């Protein structure tokens, strides 16, 4: 497989001087074409910052990001992003939200061609009966499916997903996981999934990479998911490979959490105060 996206010694910091905070430090990894990669970590580690760098929504403070061998400069329709908060326009219908993306990227299409394209991707996420509904008439899971359809409708080479299922109930989440996997298999997209759920990463991805706790967050070791597809939840629970991999990833995450808590304790400075009765 050829490299689609590469990050080389990427750092990102906010502020200057004493107020400078380095969120990510020395990020190095490659995502190959057609690969499904899951990046897992605790909340506040910089996972969203990392996905925004890959999307071109942020520029690194230092280092370089290459897309198809060329420097990544700003956002592009080649990298579709699915956000955690749906990001739908409330005054537009399901079809209208998807059509807005299609019209922006493919202005040369006729109205009929755009409509056919919109219906194709709305149908792909099983929302064709709701194509004329507005977001307020949809459940959370349905709104997230609209986000998936919108991202796919511009035909990106890479799909970047920033914890898109974290706010959903377990049953809806499972349905959408399966649906995204079916789309990935059919559309042959390269996918990066940001998640704090190790089981989700193992179920969906080819490779799992933990992100250490920041500041100065770095990527941990690569864990290859050598489980045959399709991966059935019930069957995985009795699969020794699954159990071993899950334990390894969770053990690593717990270890870096303990190290972070130890560092915080060592840095703690108690305030110089006197009791009011003194």
Image (spheres, rainbow, N blue to C red):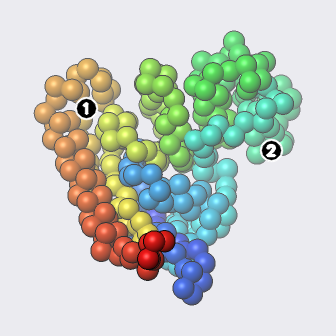
Nearest to N terminus: mark 2 or mark 1? 2
Q: Quadrant of residue 144?
A: top right
Q: Residue shown at 32%/48% (left/top)?
A: 207
* Residue found farthest to the left: 240
Task: Locate residue 176, reporting x and y percent.
Answer: 49, 26
Q: Report if residue 172 is visible in the image.
A: yes
Checking the image for residue 228, the label placed there is: 1
Task: Locate residue 116, reporting x and y percent.
Answer: 75, 24
Q: Residue shown at 20%/36% (left/top)?
A: 242
Query: Which residue lies under the disc numbered 2?
Result: 104
Q: Quadrant of residue 152?
A: top right
- Spatial CA distance of label 2 from label 1 is 39 Å
Q: Quadrant of residue 265?
A: bottom left
Quadrant including the C terminus = bottom left
Task: Locate residue 187, reporting x and y percent.
Answer: 52, 34
Task: Locate residue 180, reporting x and y percent.
Answer: 49, 31
Mark 1 surroundings: few (<14), some (14-19) or many (≥20) residues within 10 A: few
> Looking at the image, which is closer to me, 62 or 4?
62
In the image, residue 183 above or below residue 158: above
């Amino acid at each position: 497989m050829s490299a689609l996206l590469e990050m080389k010694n990427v750092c990102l910091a906010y502020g200057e001087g004493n107020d400078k905070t380095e969120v990510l430090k020395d990020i190095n990894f490659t995502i190959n074409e057609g690969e499904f990669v899951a990046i897992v970590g605790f909340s506040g580690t910089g996972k969203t910052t990392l996905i925004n760098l890959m999307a071109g929504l942020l520029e690194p403070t230092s280092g370089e990001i290459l897309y198809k061998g060329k420097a990544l400069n700003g956002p592009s329709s080649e990298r579709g992003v699915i956000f955690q908060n749906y990001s739908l326009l409330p005054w537009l219908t399901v079809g209208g939200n998807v059509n807005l993306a299609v019209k922006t990227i493919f202005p040369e299409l006729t109205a009929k061609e755009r409509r056919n394209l919109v219906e194709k991707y709305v149908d792909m996420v099983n929302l064709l009966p709701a194509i004329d509904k507005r977001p307020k008439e949809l459940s959370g899971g349905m709104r997230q499916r609209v986000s998936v359809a919108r991202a796919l409708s511009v035909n990106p080479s890479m799909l970047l997903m920033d914890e898109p299922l974290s706010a959903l109930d377990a049953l809806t989440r499972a349905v959408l996981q399966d649906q995204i996997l079916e789309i990935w298999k059919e559309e042959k997209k390269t996918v990066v999934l940001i998640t704090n759920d190790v089981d989700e990463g193992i179920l969906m991805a080819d490779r799992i990479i933990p992100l250490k706790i920041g500041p100065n967050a770095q990527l941990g070791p690569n864990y290859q998911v050598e489980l045959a597809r399709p991966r059935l939840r019930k069957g995985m629970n009795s699969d020794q490979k699954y159990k071993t991999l899950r334990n390894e990833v969770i053990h690593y995450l717990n270890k870096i959490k303990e190290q972070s808590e130890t560092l915080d304790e060592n840095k703690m400075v108690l305030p110089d105060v006197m009791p009011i009765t003194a």
